[in-house]
Image (tube, coloured by chain):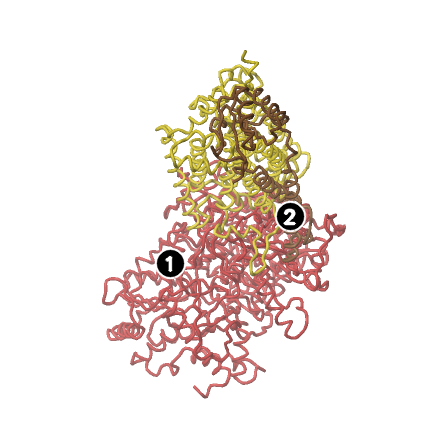
Chain colours: A red, B yellow, C brown
Amino acid sequence: MSEDKKGGIKRRDFLKIIGVAGGTAAVASSCSEPVEQIIPYVIPPEGIIPGVPNYYASTCRECPAGCGIIVKNREGRAIKIEGNPESPINSGSSCAMGQAALQGLYNPDRIRSPLSNINADELQPLGWAAAETALTEKIEELRGNGKTGNIVFISNNITGTLGNLVDQWMDALGGTHIQYETYAHEPLKEANKISFGIDKIPTYHIEKTKYLLSFGADFIETWLSPPEYTKQFSKMHSYEDKSIGKFVHVEPRASLTASSADEWVSIKPGTEGMLALGIANAVVQSGQSPNGGGGLRGMLSQYSAGKVSEITGVPQQTIAQIAKEFSSMQPSLAIGGGVSVTGTNATETLVAINILNYVAGNIGETVDFGDTLSISTADSFQDITSLVSSMENGDIDILFIYDVNPVFTLPKQLNFKEAAGKVPFVVSFSSFMDETTELADLILPNNTPIESWGDYSPRESVHGLVQPVMTPVFNTKGTGDVILSVSGQVEELNGKFTQTTFYDYLQDSWKKIWAGASGVGDFDTFWNDSLEKGGYYEKLPARQVSISKAVSSVRFPEPEFTGDGDFYFMAYPSYRYYDGRGANKPWLQELPDALTTGVWGSWVEVHPDTAKKLNVKLGDFLSIESPEGVIETQVYVYQGIRPDTLSVMIGQGHTSYGRYAKGRGVNPINILPLSTDALSGGFAWLSTKVKASNVQKHEQFVQTQYTTTQHDRDIAQAISLTELEKGLHHEEHPEPDFYPPREYDRYRWGMAIDLQKCVGCGSCITACYAENNVAFVGKEMVAKRRDMAWIRIERYFEESDNNAGFETRFLPMLCQHCGNAPCEPVCPVFATYHSPEGLNGMVYNRCVGTRYCANNCTYKVRKFNWFTYKWPEPLNWQLNPDVTVRSKGVMEKCTFCVQRINHAKDLAKDDGRDVRDGEFKVACEQACPAEAIVFGNLEDHESKASKLSHDDRGYKVLAAVNTQPAITYLKKVTQDKA
Amino acid sequence: MSEQSTLTYARVNDDVIRMLDKPSFKWWALFLPTLLFVGFGLFCFIHQVHTGLGVAGYRHPVFWGVYITDFVFWVGIAHSGTLISAILFLFRANFRMSIYRIAEGMTVFAVLTAGLFPIIHLGRPWNFYWLFPYPNQRELWVNFKSPLLWDVFAVSTYLTVSSVFFFIGMIPDIAAIRDRVTEVPRKIIYSILSLGWKGSNWEWLHYSRAYLFFAAFATPLVLSVHSVVSWDFAMSNLPGWHTTIFAPYFVAGAIFSGLGMVITLTVPIRKIFHLEDYITLDNYDGMAKLIILTSGIVGYAYGIEFFMAWYSGSPAEWGQFYYRATGEYALFYWIMVVCNVLIPLPLWFKSIRRNIKILFIISIFINIGMWFERFNIIVLSLSHGFDPAAWGIYKPSWVEVGITVGSFAWFFMFFLIFLKTLPSVSIAEMKELLPVPRKEAKT
Amino acid sequence: MSDKQGVLGIFSYLDVTIETVKKLRDAGFNNLRVFSPFPNHEIEEVMDEPESIVRFFTLGGAMLGAACGVGFTVLMSSDWPISVSAKPIVSLPPFMIIIFELTILMGALATLLGFLVNSRLRRDAPRTMYDTRLSEDKFGVMITCSKDGLKDVEEILTSQGAEDIKFDGV
């Protein structure tokens, strides 16, 4: 490949060398040598200096959002994932799932080589050559019998090159390619088709809005593009020039997203459409509509506030108030989606929401059809059902499964498992032994996205590149390469593909994009720029759309529910496990759910009154019975859910999928009926009513916070807009002190955390685990309150005069690096002390473990190593070489990422200057999608952090103890009741 | 002193030295089990060091538990020994004469026991010596500002001084034993221990001086040690710990529990070795009065804590004390109040103070109550601190129970050995109580 | 070998012992020692020995201890100056406790030393001049005198009704 230009050649040679290095590492560690052993480079490879990290831009494939990521590589190993600032999607931030991709890469339960049961009873490992031949033979045999049509390749929504390759391959073989997404948002597409004649999912501009009205769209958790929308939301909702945007969330259950809302409107499941129409009507009636209702006036007039309020259970004045604000606080935006509106009338509901946006004049303003999401191209639920039926009829001879787990994510009633059993030859490309892969006769484990070439285009304007950051950990192979080499072996397909490696294929297909692009130089510059930036990002013009007449013909029916139980049953996607794929990653299992602070399990949320009626309390087991089946899980009593609704998180309840996922919690999908949304045919998530009964069984509910209120401690403070407008005076006067105040020279590291921005998503926690080698300890240990998290998110439910009667407050609590730290003087051996730069240092080697420091810590942020915690091979490959791995008997806590501070100082020293503000970010700050955390030098009075710490809203937690923390919290801002 | 009329110098020697006769079956029946439990405690400790401190019930945020409770408990026990021998000596309170030797023995062994726990509770006990300021090539020193380091100095000083005090007091009696015993090994041992004491007026002269000074030193020491122990808590900022009354409160509590333990120990000894003529009802009466006093002080402390918490207006302070009386641990709190404040009340009646059986039972309750007092102060304050998000409940594990039981066994093991090897009653000082023999008196 | 001789008279009664001592004094025998099973003031008075100097040991030890306390805390803290919670490196209030404890410790040990050094244990009287009864219920008077004084001494002792008389080196 000498004709390859410099960029490519560098990259590929480099990767070979990394291959050598990493390979040696793999060998060394796979024969259970202590991985601490340093593998010496016989010839130091070019481009890699031991101790100096390399960073590679890539694209996250943990969920369809397709965020840009930057992977940090040390000595041939990926050790940290961070958001790519270049990416227009997440612009630098990341979510917990993205961070945890590393634990997919290094997961000890990965499939380590091809497996097959062709000439054996159970799966046996075999070499790649043998595996590919086996596949080739099957295909040839099939073609021999002329049954070409009977091949199906079911994958997730793989847009971009691999998708094309699969399509081409299937065409050549005469098979079909089905793209299955658990949450395919079909009703949204259908509704847009009906309303605007566009069969697509638009992009929304939440940041531009003054007033956001969400009907069940959990955009902070899983809806479409969480990090992006969280960032936009925090812009729109943060306190700037004396005002904040208002956010109202309508859902039967106060989800994490709803917790950030100024108002949570509890609504009767399935009647969101009615409410939207009612509001639209009120807007039109009040003459606030810029287009005067655009011919819908008459149609809307039948949805009087009174009628709507009757159907939805939402009080009339609330409807009036929302309508007033929605039309006055322009630009406004109504969004809909998520499982709560995805009933049998989902499409109608979303049409109604479109109407609301239309009459308020938001279409084209905050809803942009110029740049639509590629998840629109996923196949429909009907394609899946028909696939299943043809499998059952024995019409399928070869089933390829790529990166999907339908056995887990499809309702039991569909019998995917049994149907797949009827398929003579099932091939899985999965790298994990999940419920579906268990059915496979041949497993060709794919590289994880961190190990392979590829691309992904989450939306029209964004072409994200996926590039390998390290050599494969195990004996796995990119599916693209497998397809190409197998095609090479099937005679009929010979010459079909000119490329021999997927890398070539990828470049060739990018030549097309390059051709379409303008002003990007020759292909190699384009290619290398894209590699550097993590992809190629276009600017697409907004597209003007107008409402189509079709909407007026839409009828808005009541939702239908199977089952005759007393409770609506809501199975909602988890922002930690998505559709269950996250469950095998200990970081995500141990990341406390923001609302319940529960970990490593499932629970059902029950309203206090309902709990009284069912006579259950926290930790009791409740049996939930639908016509399709029964699940038993623990009760969490939660005031943020309707008394007539029960909800269980999706993602747990795996019967396979590795040691961390298997046999944990329940899978609510198992008891969902096979009902679909009438118009779009998409799966109807919220469509059953269940019976619930107390099974007289109790277990400790394993959570990380046992209290729900602040007990008057005033830890997470809030302030109302009017109070702020009055302009309160921030008491700057120094507390009287026995000793003179401490002097700092150039640096006093500090932090400001804006509680108005924090949404409680917990990505800071996972980022901290990844950066600082924080051990995960497992359910049994967390049950004993022995979790090691350096940063926790405190969650408080506060009495409030809003409609819900309570508000949720989140407060990230980490070491405050006090100027007058209580932990320091009590240590008999100086194991913890105050550094000249204001850090509260912790010397592991000196610590003898008296634990007095932790006793005396006002904020209880110190964690003690009760045991020496282990990272099963090869999870320990992820450990950050710059951070000590602690052993039993020593105290540990947040260090303000001192390794990053020192790195930045070294760089600054090299060119003889001070560290500049914003030059580097600490792990939690870097990950935060809401940009709630700001770290910086308080001695530099121009720095963002020091400015914020003198903000009017600024306060120190438990200031009365006079610990003089380096962290300033900015009070949450509450809307006054209008 | 009518009971002692039958006593003669010779009988004092006989009675005291008879206690050192070959151990009876009863003694072995008591001694061997202690060895067994000490062994089990040791096993628990090894298991803990090997596996990690997690085998104990500790959890965030309760980083101190049963071990520190035991530590404070045993330091407390250690106090009345020195109190009785030193302070009462300075006050010339004669009722100390017969019991102070036992009390001092108790002190020394209790400190020996207490001293183990700061090491047992360490996360990395193999580094315990880092707490001492010893010269090392890296020139690392200790933090003299840490209350834990004050502990190191206070407790080790206390152990040294009380052991020396204990030994000095015994020299003349050991000499007396030396003059009695005949069989070779014991003879030699006691001869060495007696340092060649002959009881000449010259020896007595310096002996009395030295003894006086020891008493004078031991008195402030005993007060300082438990004050320092109390500052382990009072120096922190934790609600329930951060208070100025701790030093006197702890000292009173220590004397209280110490007296309780003295009674618990002396009553059976008195019975078994027929020491009724030595340890008289007057002695018990005197101790019982001290118990009433200290029980009163402790009770007052319980009350005033609540008042201060309420008066401070700090939600954390008040929350802590409200929690103590009503929270998950309320039972422990009320056990403490009943045992330490209510049960000693009958001692106001002379008849009860002089009723050995009742006194013994009360003393047992005092021991229990005082153990729970320490548990409440330590665990409850920790489990219910400033930040509600960090509240948690602590339950001891079998390892902690094993080590605690082991510590009691360890204490009684030493005590039983002491009974059989050293004079449990001061021969010389008993003689001082007797009328001096005079020729005139006889005719 | 000197011509000094030792005589030990053993008595049952304190008053007799005291009397004997006085008599011996009158007869010009001043090198006397009295043995008793317990300390007794009358004996102290009649013997009137100079005030014990143990107290100077105690004082010295205590002062040395205090000095060590100051030295330890101040020097060690300054040698490894580590700042904790905005407190000065050398802050006396906490050091006071260390100083106090060391004062007590060294004072006590010095007292022990003073006692051992001054009481002349085992050197005070030859072993032969001791009787086991002296640690039980008898009082003893030991006289060291020249050979020719022996007669008078024995006379006085017997006249006082000594229960037993021991001669050294006979």
Task: Please tell me which residue lies in front, A705 or B335.
Answer: B335
Q: Residues within 10 Å of mark 2 (few under 14, many from 20)?
A: many
Task: Please tell me which residue lies in front, C94 or A653.
Answer: C94
Foreground mark, 1 or 2? Answer: 2
- CA gap between label 1 and label 2 equals 64 Å
The percent position of residue C123, horizontal first and vertical second, equals 53, 38
Residue A324 visible here: no
Look at label 2 and name its amino acid. Gly
The percent position of residue B205, horizontal first and vertical second, equals 60, 32
Q: Which residue corresponds to mark 1?
A: A657
In the rendered view, does B145 fall on the left or right side of A220? right
In the rendered image, the vertical position of residue C118 relative to residue A220, given as above or below? above
In the rendered image, the vertical position of residue B285 relative to residue A522, given as above or below? above
Look at label 1 and name its amino acid. Tyr
Instruction: Name the disc covering residue A484, or none.
Output: none
| Secondary structure at numbered mark 2 | helix
Q: Are marks 1 and 2 in contact (CB under 8 Å)?
A: no
Question: In which quadrant will I find the N terminus of chain A?
Answer: bottom left
The percent position of residue A325, horizontal first and vertical second, equals 66, 53
- Which quadrant of the view contains residue A92? bottom right
Do circles 1 and 2 both sit on a common chain? no
| Secondary structure at numbered mark 1 | loop
Q: Which residue corresponds to mark 2?
A: C69
The percent position of residue A294, horizontal first and vertical second, equals 62, 60
Dot 1 falls on which chain?
A
- Which quadrant of the view contains residue A112? bottom left
Q: Residue at x 28, y 60 (%)?
A: A421
